[in-house]
Amino acid sequence: MKTQFATLTLAVLGGLGAMVVPGVSQAGNVGTYGSCFGGSKSQAITAAGHTPVAVAALDAASLNGLSGLILESCGGYLSSKINADVTSAVNNGMLLVIDDWGPDGSTSAALPGTPALTWVYAPGSQIDLVAGMPFITGPGGTLTNTSLDGGNSSNHGYTTSPMPAGIQRLLTTSDPSQTVAVGYAFGNGHVVYNAMPLDAYLPGGWISGSPIAPGVLTYLTNILANSNMITTTCASSGYTGTQLLWCQKICESGLTGKELDVWLQRWIRQFR
């Protein structure tokens, strides 16, 4: 998201003071929806500096104010979960992290932006890192090429499709042509899609005692802490109506100088 948060004194906006400088991850509310085998995402969310929020429904009201959402998809049916409200929330600045147990030919059509990737269901036990990814090291620790190896099913599938422009490969199998996880921008937000059963290895999950459990926790924590993926926007901060429009004018429109000063003074007169 292109913003001017680095140059604005956002304290004048009161509740907007916690919004991000470009490239700097700030604390936000991260929702969790669904559970396949009981794994808790709260530890990863908290370690990444955010606040976990249980989400009961994937509608606009429930998603309002979320900086991120971890969505669990058990046994397929991803298209029934990523609805227009979820897509809109991502477009407005939310990070959507998907933990998909059933990747198949219908997966890409369900994702925001419908990236041209063909996914297949094919469980495997070896995951390799794509070199240079910023999530390899973070508040959750440091990952190596063995951190995610040896699970009952470290991954549940992959794509061998060439990466379209703007789609970043995050993880592969031992065969570098088989991509297991991808990340990409959509509107003002981001999507991280994992063809992996992360939930089973997280604290309290079905096989949380597995040797790869620490690596899975590190991976999810560092994804949530990545400054290029989770941001806070006017919309994701919960602003609506006039406040939303004015906040976007001040923080997201690219205004500078006297034009920007006019909107800042207008905000101060109206809302302080």
Image (cartoon, rainbow, N blue to C red):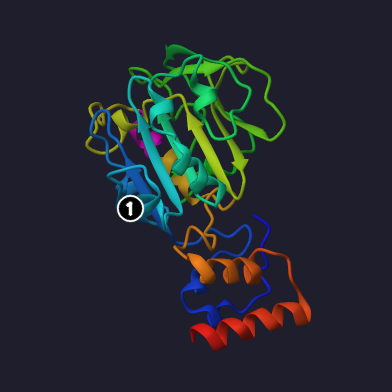
Residue 69 covered by magenta stretch = no
Please tell me which residue lies in front, 169 or 106.
106
Q: Main secondary structure of the magenta part?
A: helix
Residue 140 seen: no
In front here: 103 or 269?
Answer: 269
Q: Residue at x 46, y 24 (%)?
A: 195
Location of residue 19 with respect to 144 vertically, above or below: below
User: Vertical placement of 84 versus 173: above or below?
Assistant: below
Q: Residue at x 49, y 27 (%)?
A: 110
Q: Which residues are magenta?
A: 212-217
Q: Residue at x 38, y 37 (%)?
A: 71
Identify the residue shown where x is 49% and y is 87%.
272
- Looking at the rendering, in which quadrant would you find the N terminus? bottom right
Residue 203: give x, y in percent of width and height: 26, 39
Residue density around tag 1, few if under 14, some if 14–19, many if 20 or more, within 10 Å: many
Please tell me in which quadrant of the rendered image residue 219 appears.
Answer: top left
Q: Position of residue 166 (x, y in %)?
A: 69, 35
* Residue at the spot of label 1: 52
Q: Position of residue 82 (x, y in %)?
A: 44, 34
Where does residue 228 sit, x and y in percent of width and height?
60, 50
State whether residue 215 appears in this view.
yes
